[in-house]
Each structure stands twice: as C-alpha cells, then as structure tokens.
Amino acid sequence: MPPAPLDPATHRPHLEEALRLAREAQAAGSAPVGAVLVNARGEVIARGRNRVGEAQSPEHVGAASVAHAEMDVFFSVGKVRDAETLTLYTSLEPCLMCGGASALLGVGRVVWATADPWGGSGRLIRWSDHPAMQETDVVPCPDPDLEAEGARLFAPEARRAFPEEGWALWRQRYPAETAGVE
Ligand SMILES: [Zn+2]
C-alpha cells in the first residue's frame, strides 16, 4: 500500500505535531525541529525531535551534533519495515544526513512544513543519478500557514547557526518571518 493520499488536510495534523515537537526541543535547550513517522493507515508509529543540546539517554540519541529529529525517529523505530508505505513528517526540510537516511531506508514520502533554503536536502532526496535511491517522494511545504509558523520558529536558529550566505537565503525565502530576528 502506498503512503496516504496527498490531500493537505491529511498532512496538517502530522505537521502540527512535528511543530509541537519542535517547540518541545526548543524548550529543552535543543534546536527547534520535530518529526513524526506515519504508516499507511495514518497512524503515528514514532516521534522524534532535535536533541543536540541534551544528554544521551538509553531512550534517545543526544549529546551529539548529529542528534537531529529525524535520526531520533529512526533510532526510536528501530528496524524500519515496509518503508515504502511510510511518510516522514518534519517541521523543517531535512538536512543532507536526514534526507539521505530517509532515502537510504526507502521511506515512501517525506513532507516538511518549512523549507530550509540553506541546509535542506529536498533538491537531492530523489538522488536522481543514484540507482539505489529512487523511491522517496517529497512534498515541500503543503500548508502555507504551517510553513510560516515553522519559519518563524526556526529563524533565530538559522541566524545563529548558519553562515552569512545561509542567513541571506533565509531572509530571501522568508522575508516576513525573518524580519525581526537579530
Ligand atoms: Zn538532519
């Protein structure tokens, strides 16, 4: 069975949950990014969030610069089965590592609330000249309200963590949402 249909109404509650997890990450001292993995029946089978600023625990990745929300999801779910039927929802376009992991595992679809014009891997997830990584569909920013919400949430981190040219791309893509960020 392929992933659930592309109706934005289907995506919205899962993107809202990814954004809720992103705020939880921020409150815990990590970067504001969240993710959920959803099966073909629309059930959430794993939740994750960025834990870069927190300690490693038996339950969660942490204490490492690679403790991204999507990696938290993949470690949480363990062995990924029927990957082609799964949809990964993230608050922010996955980075090269997390987009690469999604494609490597053969996750059927990746949907994100907000684009990351500097660090996002959406332009590469299909790995168009890589024969083993052809199966992952991508759905960028299906909900304009949630896209703006995610941009406002991550903008301060983009300002802090990205080099000047990265921040310039953010300001270009999200002028309203980045306007007040010092
Ligand atoms: Zn990542």
Image: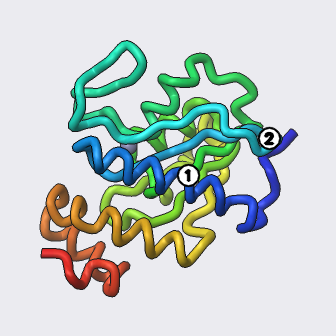
Give percent across and percent down for residue 51: 31, 36
Whether residue 69 sits left or right of residue 13 in the image: it is: left
Mark 1 vs mark 2: in front = 1
Q: Report ligand 1 position as a quadrant.
A: top left
Q: Which residue is located at x 55 percent, y 38 percent?
A: 102
Residue 84 percent across, percent down from the top left: 73, 36
- For the residue pair 159 and 44, the one nearer the viewer reads as 44
Which colour style is shown? rainbow
Does ligand 1 reach within 8 Å of label 2's beta carbon?
A: no
Instruction: Decide: few, some or many residues near mark 2? Use Cα within 10 Å; few <14, some 14-19, many ≥20.
Output: some
Q: Position of residue 127 (x, y in %)?
A: 54, 47
- Where is mark 2, residue-wise? 40
Q: Name the residue under label 1.
A: 17
- Residue type at tag 2: Ala
Question: Residue at 56% of width from left, 68% of height from top?
Answer: 141
- Identified at 70% across, 23% down, the residue is 81
User: Would residue 138 be found to the left or right of residue 58 on screen?
Assistant: right
Q: Are marks 1 and 2 in contact (CB under 8 Å)?
A: no
- Residue nearest the viewer, comparing 80 with 37: 37
Instruction: Determine whether 33 is above or below 50 in the image.
Output: below
